[in-house]
């Protein structure tokens, strides 16, 4: 299996700043035009926030539905993201956040 085959829909890779992610690791993803977003410096809760959002999406949305395919998954997640951010004006005002952009790229 080649990364090119699987990376067609990928736009972002969100990762922390651990030393195990080398320049060679980044080069693999940048070669297929995937933008690498590193968690903020000295923000130890950044991973926890991202993991909590993913857990919320799974618990509130995906655990309650039978997903029939990738297209259906993208539709369900885009609806969830719209609902999650519609009631939070601070998230709309701060649309420059990489995490917000990454979440909205589901559609």
Image (cartoon, rainbow, N blue to C red):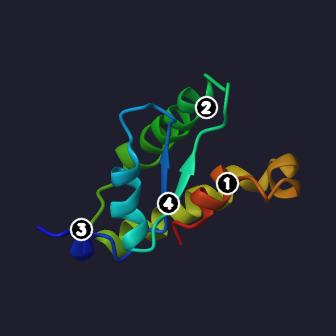
Q: What's the CA distance linking mark 1 and mark 4?
A: 18 Å
Q: What's the CA distance linking mark 3 and mark 1?
A: 23 Å
The structure residue drawn at horizontal position 48% and vertical position 68%, both measured from the top left corner, is 11
Relative to 24, residue 107 above or below: below
Q: Earlier in the sequence, mark 1 or mark 2?
A: 2
Mark sitting on residue 77: 4
Asked which secondary structure carries label 4, the reply is: helix
Residue depth check, mark 4 versus mark 2: number of the one nearer the observer: 2
Residue depth check, mark 4 versus mark 3: number of the one nearer the observer: 3
Relative to 41, residue 88 above or below: below
Asked which secondary structure carries label 2, the reply is: helix
Q: Residues within 10 Å of mark 4 (few under 14, many from 20)?
A: some
Q: Are marks 3 and 1 in contact (CB under 8 Å)?
A: no
Q: What's the CA distance linking mark 3 and mark 2?
A: 27 Å
Q: Which residue is most to the left?
A: 1
Q: In this figure, which residue is indicated by the disc labeled 3?
A: 3
Q: Position of residue 104 (x, y in %)?
A: 62, 63
Residue depth check, mark 3 versus mark 1: number of the one nearer the observer: 3
Q: Is residue 2 left or right of residue 72?
A: left
Q: Position of residue 59 (x, y in %)?
A: 44, 37
Q: Earlier in the sequence, mark 3 or mark 2?
A: 3
Q: Earlier in the sequence, mark 4 or mark 2?
A: 2
Q: Earlier in the sequence, mark 4 or mark 3?
A: 3
Asked which secondary structure carries label 3, the reply is: helix
Q: In this figure, which residue is indicated by the disc labeled 1?
A: 98
Q: Position of residue 48 (x, y in %)?
A: 55, 27
Q: What's the CA distance linking mark 4 and mark 2?
A: 21 Å
The structure residue drawn at horizontal position 64% and vertical position 50%, both measured from the top left corner, is 99
Q: What's the CA distance linking mark 4 and mark 3?
A: 23 Å
Q: Quadrant of residue 39?
A: top right
Q: Earlier in the sequence, mark 1 or mark 4?
A: 4
Nearest the camera: 30 or 72? Answer: 30
């Amino acid at each position: 299996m080649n990364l090119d085959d699987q990376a067609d829909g990928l736009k972002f890779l969100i990762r922390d700043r651990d030393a195990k992610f080398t320049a060679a690791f980044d080069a693999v993803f940048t070669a297929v035009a995937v933008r690498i977003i590193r968690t903020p410096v000295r923000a130890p809760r950044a991973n926890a926030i991202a993991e909590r959002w993913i857990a919320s999406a799974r618990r509130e949305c995906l655990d309650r539905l039978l997903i029939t395919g990738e297209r259906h998954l993208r539709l369900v997640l885009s609806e969830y993201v719209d609902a999650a951010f519609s009631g939070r004006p601070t998230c709309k005002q701060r649309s420059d956040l990489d995490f917000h952009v990454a979440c909205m790229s589901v559609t």
